[in-house]
Image (cartoon, rainbow, N blue to C red):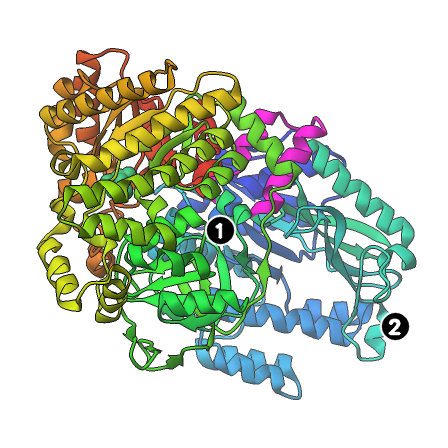
Amino acid sequence: MTGETKDFTLITPSAEISEQSHGGRAKCLQRLIRLEIPVPRTVSLSFDAVHRIAEGERPDTARLLSAFGRTPLVSVRPSSEDPDWGGPGAILSIGMNDERRAELATRLGQEAADRLYLRFITAYANDVARLDPEPFEEAAEAEDPVAAALAAFEDEADMPFPQEPAKQLAGVLRSMARAWEGVSARLLRQARGAPVDAGLGLVVQDMAHGLGPGESGSGVIRMIDKVTGDPQVMGRYKRKSPEMRAMGRKGKELYLATDPRGTSMQDEAPELFAKLVDIADRCRNRLREEMEIKFTVAEGNLQVLDAVKVQRSARADVKVAVALAEDGIISPREALLRVQPKSLTELLHTQVDPQAKRDVILKGIAASPGGATGQLVFTSRAAQTSASHEIPCILVRRETTPEDIRGMHAAQGIITERGGMTSHAAVIARGLGLPCIVGANKLTISARKKTVTTADGRIFHEGDLVTVDGTTGEALAGAVPMLEPALDTAFRKLMSWADEVRDIGIRANADTPDDAHMAHTFAADGIGLCRTEHMFFEPARLSVMREMIFTDSEVDRQAALEQLLPMQREDFVELFRIMAGLPVCIRLFDPPLHEFLPSDREGMMGLAESLDLPLSDVVRRVESLSEFNPMLGMRGVRLGVTVPEIYDMQVRAIFEATVEASRQAGKAVVPEIMIPLVSAKREVELVKTRIDAVAAAVRVEYGVAFDYRLGVMVETPRAALRAGEIAAHAAFLSFGTNDLTQMTYGLSRDDAGRFMGTYVSNGVFHEDPFHTLDKEGVGELLLIGAERGRAARPEVVLSVCGEHGGDPDTIDFCRQAGFDYVSCSPFRVPVARLAAAHLAL
Ligand code: PEP
Ligand code: MG
């Protein structure tokens, strides 16, 4: 074949080949040819031609093969538009038949000729003729494997093995074209992001065996370590000299670069090695990517068969993108676009090594990423004991409550039987950066026997070693190798480029000074949500808190609050100091009070002891505070209106901290105060009046002027609908999409895990709405709230502070709706910063 036709194109520097018409592999081969890299003769079939073959058109393979001389031997490989979309496996040595076998035996030896023929017969039988693989596996063991395989083919297919290369090639092309159009292949590539009508090209290439006298062999080379991304010549070379074959050996694996562990190509064939390194360098510079290059050597001659992007870890991806940009090969903008935001999670946490062997014992919702190994414990107390002996542990609970906070702090990983993406365990674990699996509802936990029984009946006891993989939602038996986090220079560089381009703020949800440090480390633009109740979970504070909740007397309550005040004030001073002038948004107390009281007898006895009260009093009080539906009960602003002393104490602590922090910093701190769970403007008015009064009192007492900004959390549907009148009293509206999702769907955020899997797999929900914002429903409330809020108060600051804030799709939605910032767990801040940059590019 000379020239080009529409169907078959000989790949030359000037041939008309594009990713969109012939696929990525064909285009890459053309680029290699343009770089004057030696590539075997290759003919490319367009998407259109392959599609017609799948439909039944017979390709003129005799003409196609004429491009490869009189006795062609070729390979066929898939060439989809994006190599990540995959495609049917390659088929090699098409053209092998009895005649070629005899001829090759004289040139390369009988063994090599037989091996090539046998492999081709088997591939043809399996992939083209679709015969049962077993007889061919048996044939491979026979004394004369080729004869046995030919006989097996004739038996199974009822016809002799085709000897004409053109017929063989036609069969191969048809089977590969049809495989691409099959349903399972289509679903697989769509899952990888391919459009429904993605096309397949095929490349037919002259076989370059890497066999022959003199230096011969085949291998791959790449210039980086796939896991770390560090520059390093890696790969392998399988030397197949005739001498070795004569000794009955298949070939010898050599290292590429000099290596103390054994023989290397660099030492044995330095010129060849230098040529390969030069090719790999040219590829990096001109293809603007780290490529894995497949090559063969025959009689000392190097041929490059193919080059594909090096498949690598997320951390290597960041390193490569930044290195390419710093070497001036790509722009920083392109480096940003080359890293997937979600993949950054892999860098921020210790991860289970993806290469590790996995003995999966349970599966649930992947609620907080990362990997950790530890001994099983079943109570928070056991977790704390474990921590005090410096023994890593994994806390297993049916669900967690605020009482478990200390245990969660002490544990390395968390598993709960119940719960969903925004249940207590999930939210806290994400904040702490601990791997967590929730909704593992196929488990049976016996806290009494201290055992977990898995779905397949395996029993694990307290003290057994397990690994939580919060990235996949799986727990594994025993310890598993881990990869450490990689917040290296490359990561920081990439993040700084992201910050230069993004146009929406990214704050962190941070409750404690530790969280604030994390938020600052991840360069959040401020704190968007400080859930103050989380500050009360330290042992000393919890008991004062309980005293406060417990008492019926105003005087005693005031006394308890006065004890809590300095503790809160110190926390706030710390937060302001750590955030160094960045905004800090503090939410007033939100959860139902009874969450702070013990739920079991043991806990109540402890409380009775510490309060010096009869147990019956404690039980009665706990009962009196219990509600049928606490999430919709006395919590949030309802508590602020009903027991206003708590908010009074909190805002006083905030204002006193403001005075102190401003003094320390030498410049004014302006705190943001946020009221939770509002549903009516009157609630805001009542709370605001009291806050103003406290502010005025503190100003007078300290003789210092300060400002503050008051905002409202929009997390009930009514607040979104009435955002106009609410915004009249609020400098900012922060959408709490966790509660807003819960209330919009009427779906408990703590129980949804039980049926979420079934709902998503049945397509009732596209995705877990606690994970990815439901744009149609909850999103509409966001838009209504934003529009009405802005209409009443054009300068009102809008944000999302629910867990959705860290989700790239939600950020896209908020950005388009003109929101000012999103706020998410500190560990999700980098993902959000990069996602926001992608959106702005
Ligand atoms: C929310 O409801 O979205 C929110 C941020 O508050 P919390 O998760 O504390 O209820
Ligand atoms: Mg809420």
User: At numbered mark 2, what does the secondary structure look like: helix, strand or loop?
Assistant: helix
Picture coordinates of residue 480, whole percent (x, y): 55, 68
Q: Is residue 474 visible?
A: yes
Instruction: Confirm or deny contact between disc 2 and disc 1 (CB under 8 A).
Output: no
Q: Is residue 693 above or below residue 215?
A: above
Picture coordinates of residue 283, whole percent (x, y): 71, 38
Q: Give the extent of the magenta segment.
A: 314-342
User: At numbered mark 1, what does the secondary structure look like: helix, strand or loop?
Assistant: loop
Q: Quadrant of residue 37?
A: top right
**Is residue 316 magenta-colored?**
yes
Picture coordinates of residue 264, whole percent (x, y): 85, 60
Q: Is residue 318 left or right of residue 172?
A: right
Tag 2 residue: 243
Q: Quadrant of residue 439?
A: bottom left
Q: Is residue 340 visible?
A: no
Tag 1 residue: 86
Q: Is residue 418 above or below residue 508?
A: below
Q: Is residue 282 above or below residue 226?
A: above
**Is residue 109 magenta-colored?**
no
